[in-house]
Every structure is written in structure tokens, then in C-alpha cells.
Amino acid sequence: VGAVTLTPLPTISSQLLKNSTYSTHGPGSPTGLSVRSKLISISTSSGSVLLYDHFENLHIVLPPFRPSLPSTCVDVNMVCGHVVTGYQDGTVAMWDCGTGKICRSIQGNGIAVEQVKFVNPKVYGDGKGNGSVGGQDRDTVVITVASNGVVNKLNFTGGVFGYGVEVDCLLDGTAGSVVGLSVGERCLALSSSKSSFVVVTEPSIRVVNKWPSPHYEQLADKDNNKQTTTSDKTKELPCLCWTFTKMQGQKTEMLCRGWGDKLQFLKMNLPEPEAVYPSFGSEKVYVLRGEIMGLSPLPAMNLACLISTGGDGNGGNVRREPTVIEIINTTSMTVIGVIDVLQSLPSSPPSSGITFTEYGNGKVWYNDSFAHDDNQTYVLSETALQVLKVENWNAKIERLIASGEWLHALSLCLDHYSTQILSESSNLLRPSLSRSVSHTITHHPFFSPPKPTDEEVLLEQYITQYLSLAIENAPSSPDATASHFRMIANVVIEYCVVTRRLDLLFGSIFTAFVGAGQSHTFVDLLEPFVLSDQLTYISPLVMSTFVEFCKISNDLGRVERCLVHLDVKVMDFDSVLKLLRNNKMFSALFHVYTSGLDDFVTPLQILYEEIFDTADSSEDIHRFANGRQNGGDALVYGKGGSSSRSKRDPFESAGGLGALYIERCFKDERFPRGGELSLPDGNSSVISQILNLLLAPSYIVSKNPNNRREAEKSRGFTYPYIRILLALDPQAVLSILSDLMMKEKDGGMWDLGEESGVIENTDIVAILQEVFGGDSGLPPFSRQIFLDFVADLIEKDLVSLEDAQLVQDVLVRLADDNPTKLVPVLSALTPGSYDRTAAFEAVEGHNRAELVLHRETRPQTSDSFSKVIKCFLVDGERDFRFGVFMYVEETVGGVGNGDEMRGIVMEVLPDLVSCDVGRTVGLVKELFLEHFGEVMVALKRKGVQGEILYSFLRFIFMGQGDTSEGLVEGVGGVGLTGRVGFDDRHLFIQLMCKYDGGEVYDFLKGKKGDRRLGSGVETGYLYQEEEDDDLAAEDMRGVGDVFYNIHTALQICREFDLTDATAYLLELAGDVDEALELMLRKLENDLVEIKTRLRTGGRGVKEVVGRLSKVLTACLDLCQRNE
């Protein structure tokens, strides 16, 4: 929240700007920066080092180590009073800050030193932060990083004759260029282009943690689903920085790693007493607005990120420069400020910018442009040295308040609370509330917070000061005053809700509104916060004011809507329940009882008193049900239990609300807010309690003398509680009970206590039968709805009835209004549950229902068997008729009186063939193979049409016909064909000549294709039945399994004038010449007929041509066989 400023140090900046104008002389441009408690050091391209104090006085200038040798980096250690510098040729020199003389130097090897850092003694201690300097105060440790990736530890040891130095290699360069170096309190961090390391140097050099670079490990932001790929990040270099954060109220060191646009926080886990080295836990990865070029810690647990938001330039060859600095709070992990770097730099020369180290191929590292001491961070550019500061969070707010920008100031207060105070507060873990009704306002977790922090006290002072000024400066005109106070109320309510200061909101703030005469304005604006579940508590005083306001506004529904969103566990139950009862706010009453007390029956009893009273005062309580019966509105309630109609009769409103509440409880849902109802001991007890009330045989007189009512009028009926709801809407109430009974089918049984015991579905139906029977006091049509309800229960197998009269009433009802349900209902009933004679009377004329009754006859008699078959066969639905075959097969094959049953089947056999010839043939083969003669007699008896016999025989000899839906496996010559007598074969040929004359020739030839059953042998084979011994063998020919006498067949074909078949039989009889002559005469006659028809208009020519074509084909076949 605090303002971020980047301010140049005027004296040093002017000197740097002046130095930048010298082309050959002067100190040169800055190359590195180091800041400590007393000195600011700047290394330059000329090799000299400028040392300033914090008053910007030039303390001393360290001369170049060698002429024309640029200094590349610098660091200051005020503990030992030394400055260390690195040079372009690899030289490292340690200087005395006071005298400006060299203490010790190390000759370079030609490879530039790019970073030098003094090491905190804790880093090279015992690994636990216990520092040691080897017993000599003058020992100094420096870490150097060369451009080839070699990292050395230099141990400078003071002695009588000067300083000695020992060099230990930490990294040998094989890991690549090391561009990231940061020294923390316990460890130092290094990062190459491949990996990042955390290293301790004592008691021995040890890498305690290692993380791969994003080139090898994808760092993805979980929120934005962004990923880093190797090809995208070839020019990104890592930045490292040690900083601090708070974990559970404790200050903890943390390593920040920037790589590309990703910022990763690695929190240090404090080592256990027996542990030697610390460990790290990876935190969330954040994606910033551009590539991170440098990192630096700031006071108050903040982090400065130097970011480039520009592109790569021409193909990535132009180096990117930082454009903004983002300030991130390391506790809340939020951006608290952004500042433009370029705007704060001097405008000349045009090339001025943040100092950097270039690694070739456009790779640039800016971390040396950042330096910090305990209080602030410095940013070095080529022409200026600037101080980066983050103001305290309230400084900007104080300025806004001073300038009168109150709303902006309060908005920043809320931002600070949400991002800082909440994340740092250990009071977020509130204890859960019990269900005791003894809770008062002092128990509310937001109303009585712990002792406020200094920041929370400031927040309270700001809102109090704002409210006081706003009330004092209220306008005088009524309209302006109302608008003014509505604006004030919105502001203070949101402020206190966000900051969790309900004590303040309902205390001094509400008192201030009351004093200003604006209490109604205050309570009016509470509703949006309650309905959005931001505000879950209202104090008793404010609640009473809210009710008073709603009464004046004639809108008590607002109170009810709000109450169902409040946390009833911490409310004053006595006052709230009294308020709800007096104002008949039953939806809220349900919410308070069920959510606050786990009492599901008492609020229903209270509502029932209203239902009885309104019913007794209504002129005709049945008009509501009658209206629905005649197409009126259904009993429907909207969300929250409020009526979906604008105006409803009191009885209709109360009764509908009661029915809806019962329905929700039976469905394991909470009312009125919705959501799953889940109690620790299960929900069955709730259902049992409500059922116990709903099915109570008489009115339950209250034990409280103040609420005692006599059992009269609507209360005086038997089963008054269920009856009064049925009087309102029997359809809706019975539907609710039906849904409940589905639970009983799944294993639910309801224990209504010692008096009623366990109740099942059948018991509920018996109670309802009593309610709807006799003088029920219910609308006339309700009995019909009840019977439909019972029919549904029977069909779903939810009840097992033994009341024969009730079943009879159901059957009569269905036969009159819904005959399609007769069959499923009868199928679900047990035969002993109804009177058969009465049932037949009830379903008379309904074929399928009669069928079910006949099939249920036990034992199955020939009369019932015959009637079932007839019921099947007269049905209008084809697929249903097919059921007769399965029924016959099951019945005839499973009873003892088979002869009698077989006789019945023979009587209806022609009807079975008409129903489906294929299934009939299969039935004959399965059941009557040994009685095939009786089958043929049944089909040839007088009155049976020839087509029926023909289709039956055709299926046997030729297979499935076009008119058959049956699929009979194995029907053919084996089994039935051989059972057909010789005369019946001739009869079949005769019937084929009559009905399918065009197929006789092909049939006799045996070339009907796959429709012909049998062997398919053209010339046949010899077959002699016992009764035909007098026939010569040469006079018998066969087509498959069909054997016939040639002369008899020839006589039949001549009788029907079938030229092609007659000629074929003449040929088989040996008279080829006569056969040919017959066909030629037929061809000649057909040609003459065609000619005649063409002359007379051509009518019928197509038919004659077809006939001629068949004769011509037969003629050609004969010629080929006898060539």
C-alpha cells in the first residue's frame, strides 16, 4: 500500500553525470556498487573506486591498481574496514578504507573477475550459524566469481608482516558461467546458467541444496498455466537474492530466485538442533510482467525486482534494458508498488541506463546495479545513484486523508488489511462453534476479536474519524441528506465487514447513525451484505430496528430473507423466535430451529397451528384443490420458501410451505436455503419424527397453557395433520409420500416411537385409506387421486396389499381412466390379494388385463388356457401377439393334461399360422412332431382357407416366407419334410399352382436359390413309401425332400395351364418333342397376343412379355439339356 519512490542522490548523481561527459579523462563510467552502514563504494571503468559517506561527501578515491585496468566489481566490509575490488585481468585487491592503501593483491590470470563479496562470518562457521574467524580478528573471507565460472574463496589472514591469502576453489567452471551470487546470514547462493546452489564453506565446502534451471525444470504458474521452454529462454540469466519473510509470526530467511519472468521463493527451514545444515521448501512460482534483470531486498520484508518489459530487438541481438521496478511483499506475496526506472534517470546523455555486466551474445546481468544496507536500496545507473524507498503503509493514507480523499484512503486501508494483516495474523484459525443456545454476541468470532494490533487500531481510528467528519458535514436538504447517509452507511458497513469489526459496526457506528436520526438508513443497507453471506450476524438491537423498519415499509419478507442467511448459532434464540412467531415468518423459523437447534418438528408444529387456523377461517378450503383439479396453479413455492405467486390465500400459503418443508426433509435437504441435510446420527430420525407428527391419529394438544387449542373443526378429524394438507393439494402431498416410500424400498423403515412402532409403506397406505374413506372431508376427486397413487405403488412393488376392496377400487379406477396400467398393476399383485370374479368384472373388455387374470389361474385349466390364447391372438399389437407361442410352449410342455391342451392348440392352429407361420412351424416341430397327422388334419378341415395350409407347407418345404416374422432354426427336410405324406405333397403342388403359379417351374427344377430347403438335386432320387409299392421307380422324381408322382404333377400343371412346368414334366416323362412343341405353341400365341395388344393401345403388354420371357427361358433350358 505504501508509496514507492526512486530518488537520485543529488551530489553523487551530478558527479556521475559529469564523469559521463569525459571521453578519455576522468574516473570513467560506473561498473559496480556496494553500500554499507558508513560507506557507498562505486567502481569505475578507469580502475579507480569512489568511496562516499552517506552525506554524499567523497571520503576517498582508491587509485587504479594498474593504469588502463578497469575495475569490474567492488564490495565493502565495515567490520574489518576493507574494500575488495575485482579487475578486468582477474586481479583481486583488498584495500584499507581509512588509508586507501592496498592490504594485499592477487595477480590476475587474464580472466575477468565479475563479482566479489565479503562473506558473513556465520557463512563459514560450523554450519549452524555459529561464526568463527579463526581466532584472529583480522581474518577476512572473500568470494570471487570469474567470467569462466570459476568461484574461489579467498582467506585473507592478517599478521605482523602484512596479510597472507589462501585460495580455495568452490566451483571449477564446469557448471558454466556463474552469474548469480548472493551472501546470506547462514549460506551463500550461487547460480550458473544451468543450476542454482546453496553452499556453506565451513567446516568444509559443501553444496547443501541444488535446483536446476528452468531450461531443465519447467517452472509453471498454477494460476496462469504458463510454461517456460528452453527455446524461449536462451538469453535469460538467473538473479539471486537473500531476504526475509514471516512464517507463523517468526522471521525466516528466504532465497529468491529470478529466471526469465519467473520468480521463485525458497523458504529456509530452520535446522533442528541435531541438524548440521538447513533445508529449503519450494514455494509457489510467480510470473511477473517481464524478464527479471536484478533482485534486491528492501526493509519491512519487501523485495525489489528490476524488470525489462521490452522485446528482444532485432532477432534478439539488441540487449534488453530494465524499464520498471516491482516491489513485492514477501509475506503476502503481493505486488505493492511499481515504479518506472527510465522516468527517474537524467535525460542526457541519451544512452544513460542501469549499469550492467555483459556476458556475450546479448546476455546481460544487472544485479551489480542493486545494493542495499539495512534501511534502503540503491540503484546505480551510468548517470545517477538513486535511492529506492517504500513508504510505511499508512504514510500514503495519511497524505490522502490530509488532502480530503477519504474514500481512496479507506480503500487502501482495506487493501492493506486483506493483503498484509490477514496473512500475518495468527487469529485466522478461529475455533469452531458449538450448537449450544447459550451463545451470545460475545461468542461471535468476528464480533469480539483478540486484542487488536497497532495496525488494527489505526484502521479503527480512520473509519471513526471518517464517520465523525461525514456526519458533521451532512447536507441540509432532505434528498441530499438521504443520499449522503446511504453513501456513508455503505462505506462503513463494508469497511467493518472486511476488517471483521462487527463490534465496531454494531456498537459506536450504529450509535452514531441513531444519534443522527439515520438508523433506518443503516439497517436498510445491511440486507445486500447479508444476502451475499458477507455478514452472518446482526446484533439484537440492530435486528429489532431492522424489523421495525421492515414493518413500516410493509415488507417483513426482507427480515425473513436475511434471517435464513445469518449464523443462528450465535443469536439470541428467545428474542429471535418470539420475533419470528409474532410476525409469522415461518421460513426463517424453520432455519433457526433446524440449523441452530437441530429441531425439525417444533417449527412444523408451529406452522401447523397457522394452517389449522387459516383453514377454519376459510369459507371453502377445497376450492384450492378444486382449482388445481380444473387446471389451476400447482402447489409450487420458489427459492427460500417464499410463494411464487404474488398473492396467496393464508391457508394456501401456510399449507404449501408446510408441504414444501416436509418434502425437503424427506429428500435429505435443508430448508429453506437448500444444501444437503447431513446429521451425525443420520437423517432417518428426522424423517421418523416428521412422519410421527404427519400420521398422528389425532390432534396433539400443547402442554403449554398459553398455546393450548382444542381438537375441534379441522383439528377434530382423525389424522388431522395429513388430512389438512390433502385438503389443499392431494396430488402434491401423495407425490411427496411416494418419493419417501421409494426410500423404504431401498431399506428404509421408520421408527415412530414406542406407541406407533416401526411403520412401513403398507401401513401408510392403510392410514391413507382410512383418511380417504367415508366422510373424509376431502374434495370429491381426491379419492381418485388416492387410487392412482396406490396403483403406482403397486406397479413399483412398493406395497403388498391385502385389502381386496381397495385393490378392486384401484382396478375399477384404472379400467375407467387409465387402462394401460391394468396389466403392470395386475402383474405386480399376488393372486390372493383380490377377488378373481370381481377383478374379471372390473377389467371386462380390456383384453390384456383379462389375459393376465387368466394366466394367473392356478392350476391352469383348459378353459383358462384357451382364453389366454384367444386374448393373445385378438390383440391389436403384432409383437404382443407373438407372445402366444412362448406361452403355448411353456404351458403344453409343463402340465400333465397334455392331450387336452394339444386339442385346444389344434383348434386354434390356423389362427397361429395366420399370426406367424414360422413360429407356428417351430412350435409344431418342438411339441407335436409325433402328432403331425393331427396337425395336417387341423389345417385341412372344413372352413380353413387354402392359403393357411399353403403357407404352412411352403415354410416346411421352402423355408422362411416373405410373410413370416418367425425364425425357426432346423426347420426343413430333416424332421418335418419327411412327415408330409405323398398326397399332401401333391396337394402342396396344387396349392402352389393356385397361389404362386409362377414359382412352380423353378420349384420343380430345384433352382429357387437359397429360399429352397433340401438337397437341391435337380433329377431327384428314388423314394418309395409303403402305400405306393405299385408305382414304378422311374415315375418318382424328387426336389429336395419333396417327392411326387410325375403323371399326377403333370396333370395338376396342365389343369392350371402352366406351360413351363408342364413342359418340364413332359421332358422328365421322356416326351421331349411334345414338351418343345408345347412351349413353341405358347410362344407363338404370346407373340400374337402382344401384337394384338400393341395395336389396341398396348394395355397389358408388360404382363404378356413377362410370361413369354419365362416360357422362352424354359424352352432354352430344355434345348440345352437335350442338345
Image: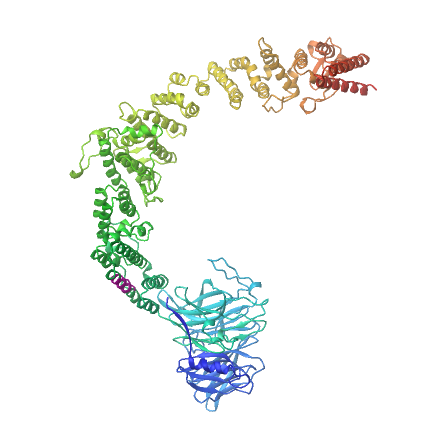
Q: Residue at x 56, y 63 (%)?
A: 232
Q: Quadrant of the N terminus?
A: bottom left
- In front here: 1016 or 69? 69
The outermost residue toward the right is: 1123
The outermost residue toward the bottom is: 161
The outermost residue toward the front is: 477
On the picture, is 605 further left or further right than 65?
left
- In front here: 367 or 22? 22
Task: Give yes or no for residue 461 being in the magenta stretch.
Answer: yes
Q: Is residue 609 above or below residue 254?
A: above
Q: Is residue 117 above or below residue 530?
A: below
Task: Give yes or no for residue 738 being in the magenta stretch.
Answer: no
Q: Residue at x 26, y 38 (%)?
A: 604
Q: Is residue 153 visible?
A: yes
Q: Picture coordinates of residue 453 (x, y %)?
A: 29, 65
Q: Picture coordinates of residue 709 (x, y %)?
A: 18, 34
Q: Quadrant of the C terminus?
A: top right
Q: Is residue 649 above or below residue 27?
A: above
Q: Which of the 4 image quadrants contains residue 231?
A: bottom right
Question: Number of numbered discs present?
Answer: 0
Q: Picture coordinates of residue 16 (x, y %)?
A: 48, 81
Q: Picture coordinates of residue 539 (x, y %)?
A: 24, 53
On the picture, is 173 further left or further right than 530?
right
Q: Which of the 4 image quadrants contains residue 706?
A: top left
Q: Is residue 143 above or below residue 1001?
A: below
Q: Is residue 132 visible?
A: no
Stretch of the chain drawn in magenta: 459-469
The coloring applied to the image is rainbow
Magenta segment, principal secondary structure? helix
